[in-house]
Amino acid sequence: MAWIAFDFNIVVFFVFIVMNQSYHGDAAKNDSLGASFIFGDSLVDAGNNNYLSTLSRANMTPNGIDFQASGGNPTGRFTNGRTIADIVGEKLGQPNYSVPFLAPNATGKAILHGVNYASGGGGILNATGSIFVNRLGMDIQIDYFNITRKEIDKLLGKSRAREFIMKESMFSVTVGSNDFLNNYLLPLVSIGVRVSESPDAFIDDMINHFRGQLTRLYRLDARKFVVANVGPIGCIPYQKTINQLGQNECSDLANKLAVQYNTRLKDLLAELNDNLPGSTFVLASVYDVVMELITNYGKYGFRTASVACCGNGGQYAGIIPCGPTSSLCSDRYKHVFWDPYHPSEASNLIIADQLVDGDTRFISPMNLRQLRDL
Ligand SMILES: *[C@@H]1O[C@H](CO)[C@@H](O)[C@H](O)[C@H]1NC(C)=O
Ligand SMILES: *[C@@H]1O[C@H](CO)[C@@H](O)[C@H](O)[C@H]1NC(C)=O
Ligand SMILES: *[C@@H]1O[C@H](CO)[C@@H](O)[C@H](O)[C@H]1NC(C)=O
Ligand SMILES: *[C@@H]1O[C@H](CO)[C@@H](O)[C@H](O)[C@H]1NC(C)=O
Ligand SMILES: *[C@@H]1O[C@H](CO)[C@@H](O)[C@H](O)[C@H]1NC(C)=O
């Protein structure tokens, strides 16, 4: 029995240290993030689509099989464990994951740790993801934040609410992939668009909408922004399968579109940094981090960067989304991709690490720990 008492003392000791730290202003400020407001698509959806009638859903096994907080049950996250946003929140000291806006518990004080508006299939453009019938695009996600914003006023009072949003909250936006994958590049649905609109014009349209959306968030008092660029969508198992590519090949067209958009996004964020007083826009180069993982997967302990762990169809299990009847790999931590579209938790851990503590190669002009501490 003695060792139990001994352990207990250690626990008490640690709790004491932690509490003692958080009582002292400055140290506490560095130790935890006030709130994390999360916008975007299935890369960061934490369950909103469970509440929509949509074809874009992940609340079925084996999704979530490694998600400890749910005991391995599906939550609506499109991966086997935590999303990048979950892990970033943990690293920055967020006590609970941001609640999905559409979940019944997204009320009262729970929203003061943050809210997640992200939705599988959603994009910058309103028409993106219409093949899934329902999803929340960026315009709607910001309408919803406007609702949360008023609730925070009620909870904290107007002046404290403003300070809380401006100084202690982080706004992350992970969007854009679906505008290509589930809009511009769709073979049938938007063939009309592709014929009539050049990549330049389409990307112009995206950037113009995105400028308006980020500016709306600023008008609602958001100041600390992190915006992810579009990953190497030409290298996901889905694109490799439908284009019948080899192990080490990626779809040129899809990656070129991503790179072209990412160049414009970088300029947009610089422009907003200059034009919106008091704002900080940080660019998360998900493209470069994921490309590094794909290129040097062996170095990071992965066995494959081309075959999905969960999925069906073709050489890379890249056609049919992950569900109860999918084939499932036995070494989930050795796959860069969980399913035909999404990175595995093992990849998300590496990506989140780079965003929180990495250097300007992947996150600029500062990393997320520095953004939090501004
Ligand atoms: C808080 O973070 C800032 C910037 O990262 C740093 O200069 C300061 O020393 C930190 N304060 C404490 C108490 O750790
Ligand atoms: C975290 O969420 C749980 C419910 O899931 C709740 O009981 C707890 O109070 C929350 N913690 C904080 C710090 O809000
Ligand atoms: C809110 O409900 C979701 C399930 O919809 C659960 O996973 C999460 O832990 C809950 N969070 C809080 C803070 O209660
Ligand atoms: C965006 O799409 C929604 C339906 O998903 C529709 O109700 C709304 O009017 C659209 N907004 C614009 C600006 O087209
Ligand atoms: C937020 O909602 C109010 C109406 O309740 C509206 O007047 C205002 O324009 C909205 N703000 C933004 C930035 O969308």
Image (tube, rainbow, N blue to C red):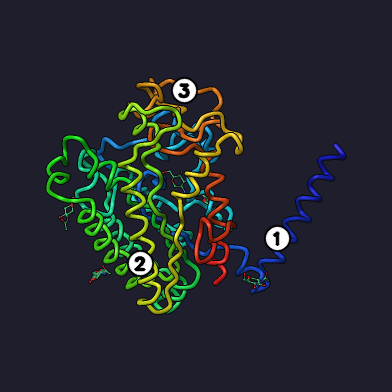
Q: Position of residue 13 (x, y in %)?
A: 78, 56
Ligand 5 closer than 8 Å to label 2 CB: yes
Q: Quadrant for ligand 1? A: bottom right
The answer to whether residue 118 is seen in the rendering is no
Q: Amino acid at mark 3?
A: Leu
- How far apart, in angstroms, are the residues tagged by discs 1 and 2? 31 Å
Quadrant location, the C terminus? bottom right
Q: Residue furthest right?
A: 2
Q: Check disc 1 and report the residue beneath it.
A: 18
Residue in the foreground of this view, choosing between 10 and 304 = 304
Q: Is residue 180 left or right of residue 66?
A: left
- How far apart, in angstroms, are the residues tagged by discs 3 and 1? 41 Å
Residue 4, which numbered label? none
Q: Quadrant location of residue 247?
A: top left
**In terms of secondary structure, where does tag 3 sit?**
strand
Relative to residue 157, is residue 365 depicted above or below?
Answer: above
Q: Position of residue 246 (x, y in %)?
A: 41, 27
Residue in the foreground of this view, choosing between 215 and 287 = 287
Front of the two marks 2 and 3: 3
- How far apart, in angstroms, are the residues tagged by discs 2 and 3? 41 Å
Q: Residues within 10 Å of mark 2 (few under 14, many from 20)?
A: some
At a point 48% along the width and 62% down the height, the residue shown is 35
Instruction: Please report whichever mark, 3 or 1, sits nearer to the chain's N-terminal start.
Output: 1
What is the count of numbered marks? 3
Residue 149, which numbered label? 2
Q: Dots 3 and 1: beta carbons under 8 Å?
A: no
Instruction: Please report whichever mark, 1 or 2, sits nearer to the chain's N-terminal start.
Output: 1
At a point 62% along the width and 67% down the height, the residue shown is 30
Ligand 3 closer than 8 Å to label 3 CB: no
Residue 328, which numbered label? 3
**In terms of secondary structure, where does tag 2 sit?**
helix
The answer to whether residue 10 is seen in the rendering is yes
